[in-house]
Image: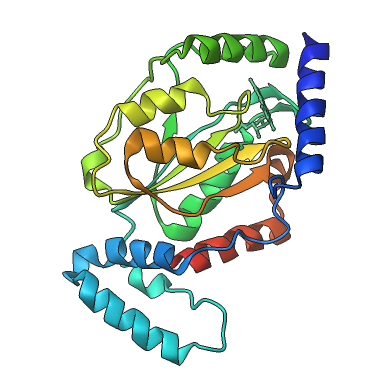
Amino acid sequence: MKQQITSLFTALLIGLTLTACGSGEPASAPSVADNDKVAVQNKLNKDEGKTEADTAAENDDKQSETETSAVEPSTEQISDGANILVAYFSRADENYSVGTIEVGNTQILAEYIVDEVGADSFHIETVTPYPADYDECCDVAKQELNDKARPEITSSVDMEQYDIVFLGYPIWWGDMPMAVYTFMESYDWSGKVVIPFCTHEGSGLSGTDSSIASVTGAQVLTAIDMRGSTAQKLNDDTKQTVRTWLDDLGF
Ligand SMILES: Cc1cc2nc3c(=O)[nH]c(=O)nc-3n(C[C@H](O)[C@H](O)[C@H](O)COP(=O)(O)O)c2cc1C
């Protein structure tokens, strides 16, 4: 089995190298479209009674004020974090390239985002935990993927109160863990903005942002992806990359 998994990653890494599709650890924050920033501002302004037209007018003003700078951080607009949720799936224990860890790679990234944007957080955990052994976990995850399983989640979140949801997960077999699908299918995502973030060891996002859009029907903004081993040792440079991505999104 170990050989199979090693071959999988080797194939993935070769594929990534050949296609140079931009996945893997970002050298710089992903470039965020202007309309992503507007979508965030519209949600953040909701509690202040501002209309989308107000936001558009403010953006026009800001544009002329900040023409020569990159993107102006708009943290002053985050009056409280009550409408932002960081929901994530993450598994500790033995994992690829990091050995046995106490806190999952995605969780480390999630906690940083929580601190930076002042959000609530929700750890997506399954009723049946995954094996601590890496190879055994790979076998279970592969079976779940093949079966399109929907593993039961231990608890739920009051999703109605949130306008913006950061959704984090590791890449498992080129997809999201099936529990993330259970999570997505448990809620009504109408009118919500979803911002994906993921960790992996070479596969990048693997199109999961598109899957999130099609499963939830929500507006999905620019995602960030990072190697798990990088997230595990989150350093100042990597934090800056994440911070730049958040700045560009308007947080
Ligand atoms: C079951 C399983 C399957 C994995 N499949 C992939 C994969 O297809 N591509 C990849 O780049 N990394 C893969 N990985 C590595 C994880 O994406 C990576 O270690 C991630 O950072 C784990 O995050 P976590 O600690 O938050 O769970 C896999 C790991 C496991 C346990």
Q: Is residue 148 above or below residue 43?
A: above
Query: Is residue 168 something that shows in the picture?
Result: no
Where residue 36 appears, as percent x and y from the top left, is 42, 62
Q: Viewer-proximal residue, 81 or 216? A: 216
Q: Is residue 167 left or right of residue 216?
A: right
Q: Is residue 240 left or right of residue 175?
A: right
Specify the quarter for ligand 1.
top right
Residue in view at x 45 percent, y 69 percent: 34
State how the image is colored.
rainbow
Q: Is residue 215 left or right of residue 71?
A: left
- Going by the picture, which residue comes out furthest to the front? 19
Q: Quadrant of the C terminus?
A: bottom left
Determine which quarter of the picture holds residue 27: bottom right
Determine which quarter of the picture holds residue 3: top right
Where residue 178 appears, as percent x and y from the top left, is 48, 21
- Numbered-mark total: 0
Query: Is residue 177 something that shows in the picture?
Result: yes
Where residue 162 appears, as percent x and y from the top left, is 27, 48
- Going by the picture, which residue comes out furthest to the bottom? 65
Residue in view at x 55 percent, y 38 percent: 207
Residue in view at x 47 percent, y 64 percent: 249
Q: Quadrant of the N terminus?
A: top right
Residue in view at x 65 percent, y 63 percent: 240
Q: Is residue 211 above or below residue 86?
A: above
Where residue 88 appears, as percent x and y from the top left, is 47, 36
